[in-house]
Amino acid sequence: MEKKRILFVSQEITPFLPKTEISTTARKLPQGVQESGKEIRVFMPRFGVINERRHQLHEVIRLSGMNLIIDDMDHPLIIKVASIPTARMQVYFIDNEEYFKRKAVLTDENDKEFEDNDERSMFFCRGVLETVKKLGWKPDVIHCHGWMTSLMPMYIKDIYNNDPHFADTKVVYSLYNNEFNKNWDGKFPEKLKFEGFNDDIIDSIKEGDFTSLNKAAMKYSDGVVMGSETLNDELKKSFDDCSGLKMEYESEEVQPKLMSEFFDKVIEEEAIVQ
């Protein structure tokens, strides 16, 4: 029987970035799921603080060279890759001079969120999907980690809805207690409209705040996971009220096995219809 294919998309993964709840989960979970018999691919942004020499990143020429249009501007897409030898696992990096060269991750030296985090998120999500298409690799499930991936469920269910490459792809979204303080750019709704998102989606996330982005991601996902043990009250209520498939918070020790089983349930379930 053909192995199920799981695409892990995370805003951070250790050892390339410091250990956090998200980066540790996004490092351990793919390895555990792979060891359970599934085929995996893993993607993250190539933030400028990542030491390319130490981690032996190199550009994948055959996958690079595309341009993505964000807010009516062309942005070259560069793909890099590195291995985690102890895990027999490769990580693909989405790179772009304008969005990811700066020596920072999501905030500046004053701990303020970057003004273009909305565009960085759009470029990252689109970059992952276009790269997977170029690889000729059709994922059964896309598992998203961190708010930088919050647009991914909407991309799959709306923008890429008629793309045969993702016709049978399900989306699982993990909720984390990693709130940001500053809403996304005031022009965010216009950028979404330029992307081609439907009015319902634009209306639900037009404020560009952490809670509305996560609630929309839940709505358009086929499965939702409690990635953190605690969430803000509004998100926790939305999770509790969610009628679809969901998985409660689980410890690191048992999570890979239970998550692999959860993916099987999501794959077998009828796709959500919006």
Image (tube, helix red, strand yellow):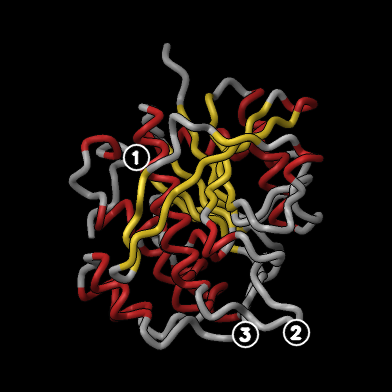
Residue in front for this viewpoint, 255 or 28: 28
Name the disc covering residue 221, or none.
Answer: none
Does 220 appear above or below 41? below
Q: Earlier in the sequence, mark 2 or mark 1?
A: 2
Q: Helix, strand or loop at disc 2? A: loop
Does 182 appear above or below 137? below
Q: What residue type is disc 1 on?
A: Thr
Residue that badge 2 annotates: 110
**What residue occupies the far left of the structure in this picture?**
162
Q: Residues within 10 Å of mark 2 (few under 14, many from 20)?
A: few
Place of residue 49 in the rendered image (x, y in percent of width and height, measured from the top left): 73, 58
Residue in front for this viewpoint, 36 or 148: 148
Q: CA distance from mark 2 to mark 3?
A: 13 Å
Q: CA distance from mark 2 to mark 1?
A: 39 Å
Horizontal side of residue 22 vs 195, given as left or right: right
Residue in front for this viewpoint, 53 or 105: 53
Q: CA distance from mark 1 to mark 3?
A: 32 Å
Residue that badge 3 annotates: 181
Q: What residue type is disc 2 on?
A: Asn
**Quadrant housing residue 70:** bottom left
Residue that badge 1 annotates: 169
Q: For marks 2 and 1, give the one nearer the viewer.
A: 2
